[in-house]
Amino acid sequence: MTTEAEGTRIPIPAELRVMIVSAFIIAIGFGIIAPILPQYASDFGVSAMAVSAVVSAFGLFRLLFAPASGKLTQMLGETPVYTIGLLIVAASMIATAYAPTYELLLIFRAVGGIGSTFFTVSAMTFLARKAPPQIRGKVSGAYASAFLIGNVAGPLVGSGLLVFGPRVPFLVYGAALVVAALVVFVMLRRSRLEDRKTGDTRQKATLAEAWSVRGYRAALTAGFANGWATFGLRNSVVPLFAASAFAGSAWFTHNPWLEPGQLAGLALSVFAAGNVATVMIFSRRSDHWGRRPPIIWGLIIAGLATGTLGLAPEPWTLLFLSLMAGAGTGLIVPAQQAALADVVGQGRNGGSVVSTFQMTQDLGAIVGPLVAGLIVDQFGYVWAFALTGLIMMVGAAAWSRAPETLQRQG
């Protein structure tokens, strides 16, 4: 049996380190626009549901093109698809900066979703294939940490960039994606050439095989819930809530350096900070404890914090609940990525398995903002957050009934 100390001593392969650096670059750019995009869309004079539709359009096209991304990954290899995806999103960001109408903004974000699913599925497939079994949790944690650290800095940088105009954050994100594409294209040249030689001969993990694993079905359920809450509601409704719920309150009188719009960026940064702290402390523990415990507890913690967010009486409460929701999500993501790698298996091409998981998560990211935006328009923020918390509890229940996916070594 491999001990935790032995697993910790195994170094992360150099190829995976390149992907981790790229993830950090991408995350800073994404964090820059995350708190800005909802307000940018609302400036076109549309409803909360229409603002949420901008987030959902991105997720919808990720969902529609996820099967294609899986097939392309199997045909071309992970790194070419990854690079193409980054460049597509970069182009969409530059176009978004100059969108003259709401309708074109919606189209540009949808195109960005195509590129996003390309680089996301190919990256997850690459990690699953290359990560040594003994340190899958460690690798997933390092990859997640790179995203999360970038997400901590990104919203604060984005809020600062607004002084140069509303277009600048989108242009900076586009430039960051081009840099990330160059890093991968240059540093993983050898891997790209190997993909061309071995892409058709690698054993493939089939969807039917994965579906027979109860842990994979639980991962799909929890992925839908996490997509709804983290990639949908948090990037669409939370910024609107943070910017509007406390406007004119005494809290801003005592903190004149912070405007209601900037509170949205701070809330997302605090959420990301909770993610980072939890991932850095606990992510590699899943190689020793198993995948189920952190996923279940993470869903419960994030569900309770998100479900009560609409009841926050003042900004400090909002920030505290955002921190707790981030900490819970930090338990979920690395362990769930490691569980997915367990299902795929080392050295196998799991494009279809990974893309199906991504589709399920994207479905949550699509449905979440639309339903939550509709509920906000009709009943208010409290009910939208409460429903999201309940959905995360359903994900916890699914994992509580699934067996452990970690196979002990030795």
Image (cartoon, helix red, strand yellow):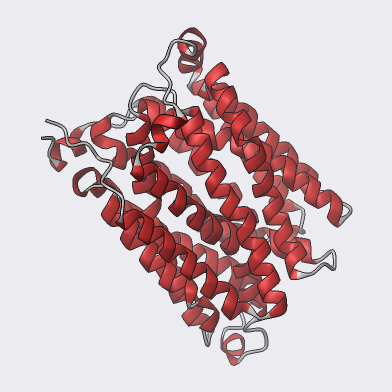
What is the count of numbered marks?
0
State the residue lying farthest toward the top.
Answer: 197
Q: Position of residue 119 (x, y in %)?
A: 57, 34
Q: Residue at left 48%, top 35%?
A: 354
Where on the picture, by quarter, is residue 143? top left
The answer to whether residue 199 is above or below residue 301 is above
Where on the picture, by quarter, is residue 348? top left
In the image: residue 347, left or right of residue 246: left
Viewer-proximal residue among 165 and 298: 298
Quadrant that contains the C terminus: top left
Q: Residue at left 52%, top 30%?
A: 122
Say if residue 34 shows up in the picture: no
Q: Position of residue 254 (x, y in %)?
A: 56, 89
Quadrant that contains the N terminus: top left
Q: Position of residue 317 (x, y in %)?
A: 47, 81
Say if residue 250 shows up in the picture: yes
The answer to whether residue 242 is above or below residue 207 is below
State the residue lying farthest toward the right.
Answer: 100
Q: Position of residue 399 (x, y in %)?
A: 34, 54
In the image: residue 351, left or right of residue 129: right
Viewer-proximal residue among 350 and 89: 350
Q: Residue at left 63%, top 57%?
A: 367
The answer to whether residue 165 is above or below residue 316 is above
The answer to whether residue 8 is above or below residue 43 is above
Viewer-proximal residue among 350 and 235: 350
